[in-house]
Image (tube, rainbow, N blue to C red):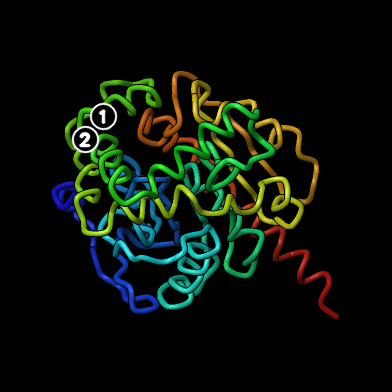
């Protein structure tokens, strides 16, 4: 992944959070965007987005969540709340101005959590194929699938069998097969992408972290978070996503609460549209960001009207 970051000419740093090493990168100047990757990914997964957004006049921050990428593979109890607090603390130390959170999959759910739990830190959020939880909830699965996934979680946590299973899952050939399931633009599945997913799996404790995350609590549901969100949202969804099918986007398409939601389905894209078809996603994001200025002005006028 170092080659990926060098190619982007990112300013890379290591930050210590709760005695754990966290890798982050910064690029560009202007209003802050904070990028949150999905399960198993890292900063490098934004390699086709950061340059465009930075060149357009934004200061882009990207982070490897604890347990992923070049961040420490800490043996802790993983949860969405842990990562939310990590990002909130990072914001307090390095940003300190309302920020647009941009996330994919569980990263999008984290972006929604930040918008709901930390409105004072939030200018807006971009959700790319937002996950419904860190893991499936038992009530969301039929009994047979629930039994299968429950058994898998037990196996992956077992010391010997879990190691053997992890060795299979992390093979570059298996990573490539998995990517072919969730990407529609197979030309995007290059050696660079496979390497940035594979290399962190070689770190000490990677298997134990993998097992811990797979057995972690699911976290809050999007429909529990949305009523507490007041900022504008851009929701982008790859139409051909087999992991979070587009039916899950109905919540956002039909929402009539306080949050203003712009929704776009991305044709011929899977679970990671920002890397599957980055040109389309980059255009949507930059166009939406340009309109945020109008929302900012309206919000400022409303605050002034309420001031005695």
In the displayed structure, does residue 138 sit left or right of residue 259? Answer: left
In the picture of the structure, the residue carrying the numbered disc 1 is 174
On the image, the x and y values in percent for residue 272 come to 42, 34
Answer whether residue 286 is visible to the viewer in this image: no
Q: Decide which of 33, 291 is in the foreground and name it.
A: 33
The answer to whether residue 127 is visible is: yes
- Residue 59 position (above or below residue 44): below
Foreground residue, 236 or 283?
Answer: 236
Q: Nearer the viewer, residue 146 or 234?
A: 146
130 is higher (above) or lower (below) than 91:
above
Q: Which residue is mark 2?
A: 171
Q: Position of residue 39 (x, y in %)?
A: 41, 45
Label tally: 2
Q: CA distance from mark 1 to mark 2?
A: 5 Å
Marks 1 and 2: CB-CB under 8 Å? yes
Q: Residues within 10 Å of mark 1 (few under 14, many from 20)?
A: some
């Amino acid at each position: 992944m170092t080659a990926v970051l060098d190619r982007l000419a990112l300013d890379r740093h290591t930050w210590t959070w709760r005695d754990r090493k966290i890798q982050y990168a910064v690029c560009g100047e202007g209003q802050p965007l904070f990028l949150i990757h999905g399960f198993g990914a890292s900063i490098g997964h934004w390699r086709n987005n950061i340059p465009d957004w930075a060149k357009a006049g934004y200061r882009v921050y990207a982070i490897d969540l604890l347990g992923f990428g070049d961040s420490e593979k800490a043996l802790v109890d993983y949860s969405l709340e842990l990562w939310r607090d990590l990002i909130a603390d990072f914001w307090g130390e390095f940003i300190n101005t309302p920020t647009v959170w941009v996330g994919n999959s569980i990263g999008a759910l984290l972006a929604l959590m930040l918008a709901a739990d930390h409105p004072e830190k939030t200018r807006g959020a971009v959700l790319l194929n937002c996950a419904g939880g860190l893991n499936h909830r038992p009530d969301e699965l039929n009994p047979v699938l629930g039994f299968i996934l429950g058994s898998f979680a037990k196996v992956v946590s077992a010391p010997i069998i879990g190691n053997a299973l992890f060795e299979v899952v992390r093979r570059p050939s298996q990573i490539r097969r998995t990517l072919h399931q969730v990407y529609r633009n197979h030309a995007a599945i290059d050696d660079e992408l496979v390497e940035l997913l594979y290399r962190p799996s070689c770190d000490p404790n990677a298997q134990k972290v993998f097992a811990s995350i797979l057995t972690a609590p699911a976290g809050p549901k999007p429909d529990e978070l949305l009523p507490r969100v007041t900022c504008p949202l851009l929701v982008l969804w790859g139409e051909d996503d087999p992991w979070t099918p587009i039916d899950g986007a109905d919540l956002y398409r039909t929402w009539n609460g306080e949050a203003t939601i712009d929704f776009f389905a991305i044709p011929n894209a899977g679970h990671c549209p920002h890397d599957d078809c980055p040109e389309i996603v980059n255009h949507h994001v930059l166009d939406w960001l340009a309109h945020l200025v109008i929302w900012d002005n309206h919000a400022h006028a409303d605050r002034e009207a309420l001031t005695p």
